Image: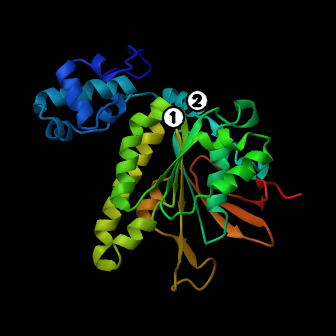
Amino acid sequence: MAEGGSERPLIRDITELPGIGPTTAQKLVEAGYSTIEAIAVATPLELSNATGIPLQTAAKIVKAAREAVGFTIKTALDLKRERLSAKKITTGSKNLDELLGGGVETKNITEFFGEFGSGKTQICHQLSVNVQLPEEQGGLEAKAVYIDTEGTFRWERIEQMARGLGLDPDKVMENIYWVRAINSHHQMAIVEELFGFIKRENVKLLVVDSLTSHFRAEFPGRENLAMRQQLLNKHLHQLMRLAEMLDVAVVITNQVMARPDVFYGDPTQAVGGHVVGHAPGVRVQLKKSRGNKRIARIVDAPHLPEGETVFVITEWGIRDPE
């Protein structure tokens, strides 16, 4: 295993990994393992079963891939440098950016949860536009992928937000890849396919709006709870790997449900329980206020102080109150 901080030879393609010839490479690509990252997060057994490669060979390939992407022992200083290299996407509101420590961060999952009309989807639309801005304006000059699970994506809103920033709406829409997830397994399959796609297409933002709706609908009742949580946990780990390995900002939205046992304080909580609660790096609760005002509150973020702020939803997008 390579020591933390040591230089590794730069490997860009799976054919450069030790033990992979043209035939093995073809088997891997056909089985969906077309990138080094996809191989690195697989187990040797998964790789062997999917491709027919002997288990011992699969173990060597996985080990080499993990070393190539930096899945090795690191010092705390290495980790600090990695975190500092994470980039930020502006939300359009200075107040909200400040609450988030400078904006929505790459290499991390940010969750926005709240009741209907609290602004979750509006923020996702705005981030899909803003990620395309130059870095000096709070963007990353990159594209977005929008996984729509509830049919809430509106190109008309993207057009308004683009005009609000003086951008060409058609060019902005051309840089947002939209896909409708029809059920939970399809949702997970889409993310699996994105590992290769994101690298090729210069994508720096992945939106899943919303994370839990299909899982709730397909696994109702207490008798299905264990299966639902198991699948949801697997899906969240997929998203975490994608964020960390590909330096992408993953933004998920979530619904809230009422808690009849709560008599004081907020009687709502995010759907998904502890599984969702422990996965995102930043959890933000959104609430309606007067008129077009919304309140955002940091619920959980180990690296950010607790706090809340106000932003507004205007015709042109997310902004600060006047």
Structural crowding at the residue carrying mark 2, measured as other residues with C-alpha within 10 Å and reported as few (<14), some (14–19) or many (≥20): few
| Amino acid at dot 2 | Ser
Q: Is residue 19 visible?
A: no
Q: 57 or 214, which is in the foreground?
A: 214
* Residue found at the far front of this picture: 170
- Please provide percent x and percent y for residue 318: 75, 54
- Left/right placement of residue 69 relative to residue 94 reads left
Looking at the rendered structure, the secondary structure element under dot 2 is: loop
Q: 19 or 162, which is in the foreground?
A: 162
- Please provide percent x and percent y for residue 226: 29, 69
- Image quarter of residue 67: top left
- Left/right placement of residue 257 relative to residue 190 reads right
164 lies above or below 212:
above
Please state, as top left, top right, bottom left or bottom right, where the C terminus lies in the image.
bottom right
- Please provide percent x and percent y for residue 195: 40, 37
| Amino acid at dot 1 | Asp
List the residue tagged with mark 2. Answer: 85
Please state, as top left, top right, bottom left or bottom right, where the N terminus lies in the image.
top left
Structural crowding at the residue carrying mark 1, measured as other residues with C-alpha within 10 Å and reported as few (<14), some (14–19) or many (≥20): many
Q: Is residue 69 visible?
A: yes
How far apart are the two marked residues, 1 and 2, measured between alpha carbons?
Answer: 9 Å
Looking at the rendered structure, the secondary structure element under dot 1 is: loop
177 lies above or below 265:
above
Q: 220 or 203, which is in the foreground?
A: 203
List the residue tagged with mark 1. Answer: 247
Q: Are marks 1 and 2 in contact (CB under 8 Å)?
A: yes
